[in-house]
């Protein structure tokens, strides 16, 4: 009898994760004999918890808050993008129990842009990134990879932005939180990677009136689907994108590695995740 394939997500607490909805949808859609299981592991039990999953035959796991940074110390190999971002969200376990740590957020971010705007060109363009947390690092990493010429990084806590800039290179320039928006007139990409605008948080309040015409505004938030940031952007005639495509695309490399099939884009899945 063919064995069931096992994967899952670890974090603590785990009530906010959408990963089981996404992976269980694909398992059903592709008729795969497998399970994707949410498992709460407290920080103190991380090492033993990981080893138990390997012993049980898991193919790998997603990793979420609060383990994304600490998990790197248990990995045997770390992909370049996870090392640069300084955090992992996807682990692959080999048959001899070795752990490879990856970060698929940068892939998910850039893929979601090309899915909606296939002809977009980043070369020689400038971007603003609001926020300097884990998601911001993934966004900056992918924008740099795509050939963006300069990124203005703006974060409430400036020191955090400074350390991101030090780690990710000279193309990342830090500006003050209360920046004069006249500086934005040569900018054609703006990414909100703060939690401003997320359900239950204050709205995004920076002025985006001075951007280049027909810029692209991306909000990593998907609840609500259209934040004030995106609504204003649309009214100003810019292209807009929310975070649902990133969320689903970042899950694909893990699913493919554990279960052997690369999922296609699927509007029904987006709707299911957003409605949940
Ligand atoms: P994080 O590491 O906790 O960073 C949070 C960021 O938001 C920091 O830059 C923080 O600034 C800023 N922030 C929080 N409250 C603020 C406030 N009241 N005023 C100004 N700035 C504030 O979180 P993260 O993992 O980077 O996630 C950031 C956002 O991206 C969240 O909305 C998250 O849901 C979203 N996200 C989406 C996806 C997706 O797949 N679509 C993936 C990852 C994250 P300080 O440094 O000053 O605290």
Image (cartoon, rainbow, N blue to C red):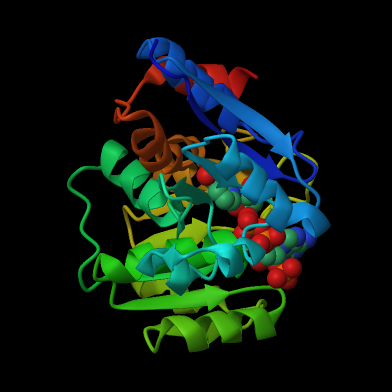
**Residue 123 appears in the rendering:** yes
Where is the C terminus found, in terms of image quarters? top right
Q: Is residue 258 above or below residue 47?
A: above
Please indicate whether residue 21 sits to the left or right of residue 109 in the image.
Answer: right
Give percent across and percent down for residue 71. Answer: 61, 61
Return the residue nearer the eye: 80 or 207.
80
Q: Quadrant of ligand 1?
A: bottom right
Please indicate whether residue 90 sits to the left or right of residue 2 in the image.
Answer: right
Q: Is residue 220 above or below residue 174?
A: above
Return the residue nearer the eye: 139 or 178.
139
Q: Quadrant of residue 179?
A: bottom right
**Residue 207 appears in the rendering:** no
Give percent across and percent down for residue 255. Answer: 41, 34
Q: How many marks?
A: 0
Q: Is residue 267 above or below residue 164?
A: above
Q: Residue at x 45, y 61 (%)?
A: 139
Return the residue nearer the eye: 262 or 49.
49
Give percent across and percent down for residue 127. Answer: 39, 68
Q: Residue at x 56, y 43 (%)?
A: 54
Return the residue nearer the eye: 131 or 60.
60
Give percent across and percent down for residue 157. Answer: 72, 78
Where is the N terminus found, in terms of image quarters? top left
Q: Quadrant of residue 156?
A: bottom right
Q: Is residue 20 above or below residue 10?
A: above
Q: Residue at x 38, y 64 (%)?
A: 79
Q: Residue at x 61, y 18 (%)?
A: 275
């Amino acid at each position: 009898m063919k064995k069931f394939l096992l994967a899952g997500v670890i974090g603590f607490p785990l009530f906010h994760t959408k990963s089981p909805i996404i992976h269980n949808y694909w398992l059903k859609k592709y008729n795969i004999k497998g399970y994707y299981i949410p498992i709460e592991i407290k920080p103190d039990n991380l090492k033993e918890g990981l080893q138990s999953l390997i012993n049980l035959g898991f193919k790998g796991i997603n990793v979420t808050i609060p383990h994304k940074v600490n998990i790197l110390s248990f990995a045997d190999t770390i992909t370049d993008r996870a090392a640069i971002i300084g955090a992992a969200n996807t682990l692959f376990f080999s048959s001899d129990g070795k752990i490879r740590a990856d970060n698929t957020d940068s892939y998910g971010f850039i893929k979601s842009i090309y899915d909606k705007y296939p002809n977009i060109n980043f070369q020689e363009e400038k971007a603003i990134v609001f926020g300097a947390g884990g998601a911001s690092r993934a966004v900056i990493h992918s924008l740099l990879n795509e050939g963006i010429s300069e990124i203005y990084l703006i974060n409430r806590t400036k020191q955090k932005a400074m350390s991101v800039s030090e780690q990710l290179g000279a193309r990342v320039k830090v500006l003050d939180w209360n920046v004069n928006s006249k500086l934005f007139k040569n900018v054609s990409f703006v990414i909100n990677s703060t939690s401003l605008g997320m359900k239950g948080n204050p709205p995004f309040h920076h002025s985006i009136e001075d951007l280049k015409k027909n810029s692209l505004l991306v909000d990593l938030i998907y609840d609500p689907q259209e934040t004030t940031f995106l609504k204003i952007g649309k009214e100003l005639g810019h292209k807009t994108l929310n975070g649902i495509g990133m969320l689903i695309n970042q899950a694909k490399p893990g699913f493919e590695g554990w279960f052997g099939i690369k999922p296609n884009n699927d509007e029904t899945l987006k709707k299911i995740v957003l409605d949940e």
